[in-house]
Amino acid sequence: MTLEVHVVTPEREVWSGQATEVIAHGVDGDVGILSGHAPLLVHLAVGPLQIQVEDGTWLKAVVDGGFLHVSTEEGSSRVDVLATNAQLETEIDVPAVTRRLEELRSTADGADDERVKTEIARAEARIALSDSR
């Protein structure tokens, strides 16, 4: 049995299809979803999202928060990832993200600005995902 998976942001549908497993990074830790999982709502943190598609390969993305919702209806499971922002691994411009991270770190200089800290976390998550290729 497979999962019906939809990854969406307010701007676009990032990916949808059938999968055998979904692994996401929630604010309380990582969660893995297989077919037949109980209904669940997870608050997502900035971090990786991994989807094992039917052929066994892994699709990787990074999400900038949001929610993961698991529902089961008539024996089939559906996973909706409602992300604030999401990028597939193949969409990440690593040199641009690296430059942006350097800029953010040089301007932060110990500043306690939450917006800057959040941007740094987002950039680091994209680079970490790209390093895992």
Image (cartoon, rainbow, N blue to C red):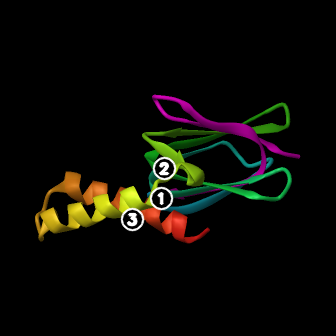
Q: Residue at x 22, y 61 (%)?
A: 104
| Magenta span dominant secondary structure | strand
Depth check, mark 1 against mark 3: the one in front is 3
- Find out whether the residues at labels 1 and 3 contact each other: C-beta distance under 8 Å: no
Which residue has dot 2 on it? 63
Which residue has dot 3 on it? 124
Tell me which amino acid carries mark 2: Val
C-alpha separation, residue under disc 2 versus residue under disc 1? 6 Å
Q: Position of residue 31 (x, y in %)?
A: 60, 59
What SS does tag 1 mark? strand
- Residue 6 visible in the picture: no
Q: Is residue 111 above or below residue 83?
A: below
Q: Residue at x 49, y 34 (%)?
A: 9
Image position of 25 (left or right of 32): left
- Find out whether the residues at labels 2 and 1 contact each other: C-beta distance under 8 Å: yes
- Residue 70 visible in the picture: yes
Q: Nearer the viewer, residue 97 or 67?
A: 97
Q: Position of residue 71 (x, y in %)?
A: 69, 37
Q: Residues within 10 Å of mark 3 (few under 14, many from 20)?
A: some
The quarter in which the C terminus is drawn is bottom right
Which residue has dot 1 on it? 47
What SS does tag 2 mark? strand
**Among numbered discs 3 and 2, the one appearing first in the sequence:** 2
Q: Which residues are magenta?
A: 1-25
Tell me which amino acid carries mark 1: Gly
